[in-house]
Amino acid sequence: MEEPSAAAGPGTGRPGTGRAGTAAEVEAVIETRGLTKQYRGTLAVDGLDLRVPRGSVFGFLGPNGSGKTTTIRMLMGLIEPTAGTAAVLGRPMPRSGRTVLPKVGALIEGPALYGFLSGRDNLVRYDSADPTADPRTRTARVGDALDRVGLAAAAGKKARAYSLGMKQRLGLASALLQPRELLVLDEPTNGLDPQGMREIRSLIRELAADGTTVFLSSHLLDEIEQVCSHVAVMARGRLITQGTVAELAAGTRGRLAVTTPDPADAVRILKEHGVTDLIVLDDKVTGELPPDPPDAPDPSESAETAETAEVAEPLDLADLNAALVAAGVRVRGFGVERASLEDAFVALTGEGFDVAG
Ligand SMILES: Nc1ncnc2c1ncn2[C@@H]1O[C@H](COP(=O)(O)OP(=O)(O)OP(=O)(O)O)[C@@H](O)[C@H]1O
């Protein structure tokens, strides 16, 4: 028989009300310093400094094996760090687990459910195990949680007959029996079909809209882009970067895209101006803009031409466009395509990413 999940404990906390801003002074609900976990032969988590602002939907992103689950287990006090510290809701973990965990709903490595019980009876069991939960209001509480995750109609079915998505939603319902300040979800859409994934994502958005901080791990970039306000990127146990999703994508240069009926000429001119990795697809030419030279002056303050800009100054897009036109290239479209989080990840880690999961 499966054991119920360890960290979805009884709750007394109130959900947070604020939304996260970008300002550093927003209170952190999770903060780690040099958090490290060494297994024999494996440095699973290496000196992690993580800061999760209250009110954020925080994506903890990294490929399989990058240390996400190990970090979450340390945050929830399930394992001891080898070195470093972790604070959750402002208190040190694992020392303050008894105070902190009732305010945290956690779903780690899939929900632990009794298959022979109905969905409703699974929740009744969870609720009964919570000494702070008033038995007189149990039915209403369980009903509300089932409603919340869209399982009211299927509440009488045995949990073993549930789809994976329904099981995941039931797990979330168990974490939602009490109001929570923080929800920690380890790969909440893992193994779900696209419909199940959509359901869980919209549920996460709803919870976040109510003011609960949500910390979720994922190896799916598009998932993070769709639901998260903030992201931390892990690779091989180390934190590569953290910040808002918008900041991270903005930090990566997008690709230049030129639409033209003269792609061959466009490629020649772009090459002459230092654009690399040129790809032609029908009437569209895309390429990597040359990196800005270090300590380059602001191009708007310079009167130099595009020819010299190649050597000493950032490439001015207006000059590049003018050069194309001057060379007789008919330009229908010209611009820099927005960089995605995937571009940012690849730029940061030098690695590809398993986008499809
Ligand atoms: N109990 C353990 N004993 C030894 N090594 C472990 C243990 N738990 C994790 N590891 C190793 O630590 C590294 C990080 O694993 P972890 O499960 O934290 O990564 P992850 O990013 O959560 O990946 P996944 O999504 O596959 O769980 C891996 O190399 C893993 O093999």
Image: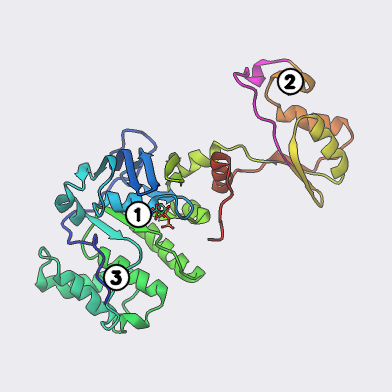
Work out whether residue 226 or residue 296 is closer to the camera in this orientation and state it. Answer: 296
| Secondary structure that dominates the magenta span | loop
Lateral position of residue 96 relative to residue 21, left or right:
left
Q: Is mark 3 within 8 Å of ligand 1?
A: no
Distance Cα–Cα, label 3 vs label 1: 24 Å
Q: Which residue is mark 3?
A: 112
Q: Is mark 1 within 8 Å of ligand 1?
A: no
Looking at the image, is mark 3 or mark 1 earlier in the sequence? 3
Q: Quadrant of residue 162?
A: bottom left
Q: Which residues are magenta?
A: 287-303
Lateral position of residue 40 relative to residue 331, left or right:
left
Q: Which residue is mark 1?
A: 208
* Type of amino acid at the residue the image marks with label 2: Val
Q: Which residue is mark 2?
A: 311
Q: Quadrant of residue 308?
A: top right
Q: Total marks drawn?
A: 3
Does residue 26 lie above or below 261 as drawn?
above
Q: Residue at x 59, y 45 (%)?
A: 343
